[in-house]
Image (spheres, rainbow, N blue to C red):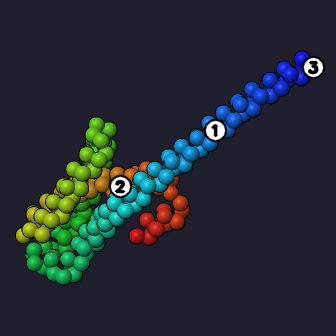
């Protein structure tokens, strides 16, 4: 009889322990659900605020590169009295600082936070793009294209890092495809 009452006592203790474990597990599960809902809300906020802006920046970057050809078609080369060689040099000079300042830009990125460096690059890029409208001759176009290459040196790479390394790993393939299409 003593053995059965001891086993009943152990059984009662283990029932209480099981109840406590179940309650603890349910609380953890509720906490995970709460955490998952917070993460989901944050991702939706990023989708609404950041991704449209990043998409616009990509679009403007590609428009800027493509519009030089359109400007030639609409007579910019003739307006600035440029020869074909001068025009081609103005197009090509964009890539010299783009390639030459890749490594120094990476070193600056190690010193500064990406959000500070990206902001500085985007302000420089926007200013340079806007001031390109003021070119009057070969030298000013050459300088504007050089500065534009300098400003774009890491912009697209940092944007890619933000989107594809930080934002997209936790996303569904459908949202990734939507970003690529836009």
Indicate left or right for 50 with 164 as reference.
left
Residue closest to the far bottom: 74
Mark 3 / mark 1, whichever is N-terminal:
3
Percent position (x, y) of residue 153?
28, 53
Work out whether residue 39 or residue 50 is closer to the camera in this orientation and state it: 39
Could you say whether the residue bearing mark 3 is in a helix, strand or loop?
loop
Residue hosting label 3: 1
Residue 3 sits in quarter: top right
Which label lies toward us, 3 or 1?
A: 3
Percent position (x, y) of residue 92?
25, 63
Label 2 and label 3: CA atoms lie apart by 75 Å
Structural crowding at the residue carrying mark 1, measured as other residues with C-alpha within 10 Å and reported as few (<14), some (14–19) or many (≥20): few
The residue that appears at 23% across and 72% down in the rendered structure is 68
Percent position (x, y) of residue 11?
80, 28
Which label lies toward us, 2 or 1?
A: 1
Could you say whether the residue bearing mark 1 is in a helix, strand or loop?
helix
- Relative height, residue 104 to residue 144 (above, below): above
The residue that appears at 53% across and 60% down in the rendered structure is 172
Could you say whether the residue bearing mark 2 is in a helix, strand or loop?
helix
Residue 106 visible at all: yes
Q: Which quarter of the rendering shows the C terminus?
A: bottom left
Badge number at residue 95: none
Label 3 and label 1: CA atoms lie apart by 33 Å
The residue that appears at 54% across and 62% down in the rendered structure is 173
Residue hosting label 2: 159
- Relative height, residue 111 to residue 61 (above, below): above
Badge number at residue 23: 1
């Amino acid at each position: 009889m003593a053995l059965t009452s001891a086993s009943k006592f152990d059984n009662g203790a283990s029932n209480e322990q099981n109840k406590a474990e179940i309650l603890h597990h349910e609380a953890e599960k509720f906490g995970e659900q709460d955490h998952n809902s917070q993460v989901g809300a944050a991702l939706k906020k990023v989708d609404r605020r950041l991704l449209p802006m990043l998409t616009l920046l990509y679009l403007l970057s590609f428009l800027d590169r493509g519009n030089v050809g359109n400007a030639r078609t609409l007579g910019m080369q003739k307006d600035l009295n440029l020869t074909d060689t001068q025009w081609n040099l103005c197009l090509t000079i964009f890539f010299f600082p783009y390639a030459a300042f890749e490594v120094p830009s990476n070193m600056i990125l190690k010193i500064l936070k990406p959000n500070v460096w990206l902001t500085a690059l985007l302000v420089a890029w926007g200013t340079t793009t806007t001031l390109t409208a003021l070119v009057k001759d070969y030298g000013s176009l050459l300088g504007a294209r050089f500065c534009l290459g300098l400003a774009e040196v890491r912009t697209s790479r940092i944007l890619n890092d933000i989107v594809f390394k930080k934002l997209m790993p936790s996303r569904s393939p459908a949202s990734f495809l939507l970003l690529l299409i836009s």
